[in-house]
Image (cartoon, grey):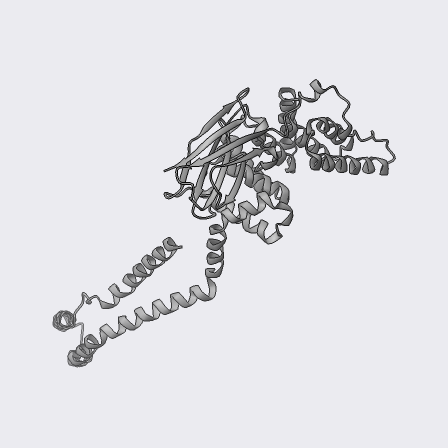
Amino acid sequence: MLLFWIVSILLMMVAALAFVIPVSGESKLTGATRDQLNKDLYKSRISELADDEDQGLLDKSEEFIDEMQRGLLDDVVDEKAIAVNKANSPFIWISGLVFLVVFSVSAYLMLGASEKVTNWQDVYSRLPELTDRVMNEGDKVTDQEISDFKLALSTKMMAEPDNEFGWLLLGRLNVALGDSNAAFIAMDRAYKLAPMNTSIVTGYAQALMLSDDPEQNNLARKILMDLKKEKPGDIEVLSTSAFMALENQDYLGAIEQWQRMLPLLAGQPDRIEMIQGSIEYARKQIEAKGGTAPTVADAATDNRPAAAANEAPAGNEQVTITITAEQAELKGYLFVYVQAAAGPKAPLAVKRLINPTFPLTITLSDSDAMMAQMKMSQFPSIKVSAKLSQDADVTTKDDDINSNIVTINEGDARSVTLNLSR
């Protein structure tokens, strides 16, 4: 906003100079110069009349001379008028300058978008709050908050074009809103930044599938086929495949993908219930067309051997974190993060506590995931850290108290100790 006003003032100054300089500048043709020029022209014309009279080409030259003398007198500059004009000239340009400023400001207030700009800045300042709402309270978020979140996130991405997680989040948001063009732009940027990230690749395929271009639809199918060969048991890949099949009204294909997902969702009853509801919806669509649909597999009564069940990704994987501090009476907002050691920069899981008492022990698991498609159990190596901030803003500040960072690899103990120190 400050930059806008600085540019506006500079433009106003340039416009003022463009007005003042021509008005206040002295005329190159002064009154004295004009009188002298008239006299020279008069003498030249008298000489020409004399020559014409000598050659017998002109009679009654006296009448022409009288007429020229009257014209010369009429064209003599009035010195008093010049003096008055010079005395009043500063008032002329000052009045004009005042009018320019008043007119410009009035025109902007009437026709400009000052209210929209102010609202835009206000929405952008609320990005941390909106992010927290959308991530943690998605079922309570209003349409206006979703719209504000999209605006704020889009603004942030213009300032951080290399943030692949931000582009992924913006792309998924646009997919959910049905904005295929915006979804493709965001996902394409994310894909170019991290073409090996499964979440980004599946999101890119979703965006391609929303397009009306058959070539992009075919590319989406190819991407997913390659992913399913590479990661046949990946929940996110299966979920995206089911989504794409549903978009194409391939209800049997969608049911097949969902049923393959159910055994992988052990310990996640909410997602199991949602998937079973989706399968039931697809079955009804098939039956409405006179077809026969397979029955719904019940993951809650999975009769597979325990060893086979354990082969699925650990949906309830968790880390136990003990946090100490150099000063036990420290107060503020405690943020505890789990991030991928290699991959997306955004946290995989976060917990926030207000005015904690140290030492304390908490756990972070897949249930604390920032996004359902990016969980701790999907990464072989993770980093655990914490910070204590004086406000609820997650943005890093100079007065934050940070902890050490502990890396956990596959096979390591899932218990770490962090210490907050300046």
In the figure, is residue 389 to the left or right of 301?
A: left
Along the viewing direction, whichever of 387 and 61 lies nearer the viewer: 387
- Quarter of the image where the N terminus is located: bottom left
Rendered view: 75 above or below 271: below
The percent position of residue 209, horizontal first and vertical second, equals 65, 34
The percent position of residue 339, horizontal first and vertical second, equals 50, 31
At 47% from the left edge and 35% from the top edge, which residue is drawn?
323
In the figure, is residue 343 to the left or right of 296?
A: left
Along the viewing direction, whichever of 50 and 138 lies nearer the viewer: 138
The percent position of residue 231, horizontal first and vertical second, equals 63, 22
Is residue 162 in sight in this rendering? no
In the figure, is residue 397 to the left or right of 268?
A: left
At 41% from the left edge and 68% from the top edge, which residue is drawn?
106
The percent position of residue 370, horizontal first and vertical second, equals 56, 38
Rendered view: 78 above or below 242: below
Along the viewing direction, whichever of 168 and 141 lies nearer the viewer: 141
Quarter of the figure with residue 294: top right
In the figure, is residue 26 to the left or right of 131?
A: left
Q: Residue furthest right?
A: 290
Total of numbered circles in the picture?
0
Quarter of the figure with residue 214: top right
Is residue 144 in sight in this rendering? yes
- Quarter of the image where the C terminus is located: top left
